[in-house]
Image (cartoon, rainbow, N blue to C red):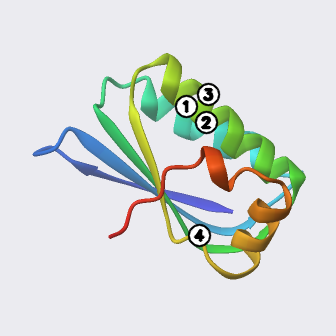
């Protein structure tokens, strides 16, 4: 799994573009890296999952923890690119209702 962070200084936000497998072996990195970025004083954050090829329950755990952490820090968190297998796993895990999706 790789994470590419893109910053938008005009909107005081960042996008985390995730690619590869998000599973037991690296989901903790997703949570740690995105949470560290959230701690940077941004107003908004976007997590782009369009490049994720595999997501398991550990990846779901990381997503839930990122949502919780963003609420603690009062950050507007939105997800992008939830499609295919990733959407199916999130639907089966019943977490789509707690995710804010960005339409862009």
Instruction: Point out residue 64 in the picture as x, y percentages from the top left corner.
Output: 70, 39
Label 2 residue SS:
helix
Quadrant assignment, res 12:
top left
Label 2 or label 4, whichever lies nearer to me, is: 4
Q: How many marks?
A: 4
Q: Residues within 10 Å of mark 4 (few under 14, many from 20)?
A: some
Q: Residues within 10 Å of mark 2 (few under 14, many from 20)?
A: many
* Residue 84 in the image: above or below residue 41: below
Q: Left or right: where does residue 55 sit relative to residue 6?
A: right
Q: Residue at x 78, y 73 (%)?
A: 88
Instruction: Point out residue 86 in the picture as x, y percentages from the top left corner.
Output: 72, 70
**Label for residue 82?**
4
Q: Residue beneath label 1, please? A: 35
**Label for residue 68?**
3
**Which residue extends farthest bottom?**
84
Q: In which quadrant of the rendered image does the N terminus lie? A: bottom right
The answer for how far apart the CA atoms under marks 4 and 1 are is 20 Å
The answer for how far apart the CA atoms under marks 2 and 4 are is 16 Å
Q: Left or right: where does residue 87 sit relative to residue 9?
A: right
Lower position in the chain sequence, tag 1 or tag 2: 1
Q: Residue at x 85, y 48 (%)?
A: 58
Q: Residue at x 37, y 68 (%)?
A: 103
**Label for residue 25?**
none
The answer for how far apart the CA atoms under marks 1 and 3 are is 10 Å
Q: Residues within 10 Å of mark 3 (few under 14, many from 20)?
A: few
Label 4 residue SS:
loop
Asked if the residue under mark 2 is in contact with the one under mark 3, i.e. CB atoms within 8 Å, the reply is yes
The answer for how far apart the CA atoms under marks 4 and 3 are is 19 Å
Asked if the residue under mark 2 is in contact with the one under mark 1, i.e. CB atoms within 8 Å, the reply is yes
Q: Residue beneath label 2, please? A: 66
The answer for how far apart the CA atoms under marks 1 and 2 are is 6 Å
The answer for how far apart the CA atoms under marks 3 and 2 are is 5 Å
């Amino acid at each position: 799994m790789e994470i590419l962070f893109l910053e938008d200084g005009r909107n005081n936000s960042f996008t985390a573009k995730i690619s590869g497998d998000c599973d037991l072996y690296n989901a903790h990195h997703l949570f740690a890296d995105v949470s560290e970025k959230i701690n940077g004083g941004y107003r908004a954050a976007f997590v782009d999952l369009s490049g994720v090829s595999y997501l398991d329950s550990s990846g779901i755990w990381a997503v839930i923890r990122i949502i919780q952490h963003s609420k603690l820090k009062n950050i507007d968190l939105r997800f992008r690119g939830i499609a295919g297998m990733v959407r199916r796993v999130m639907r089966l895990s019943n977490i789509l209702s707690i995710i804010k999706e960005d339409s862009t």
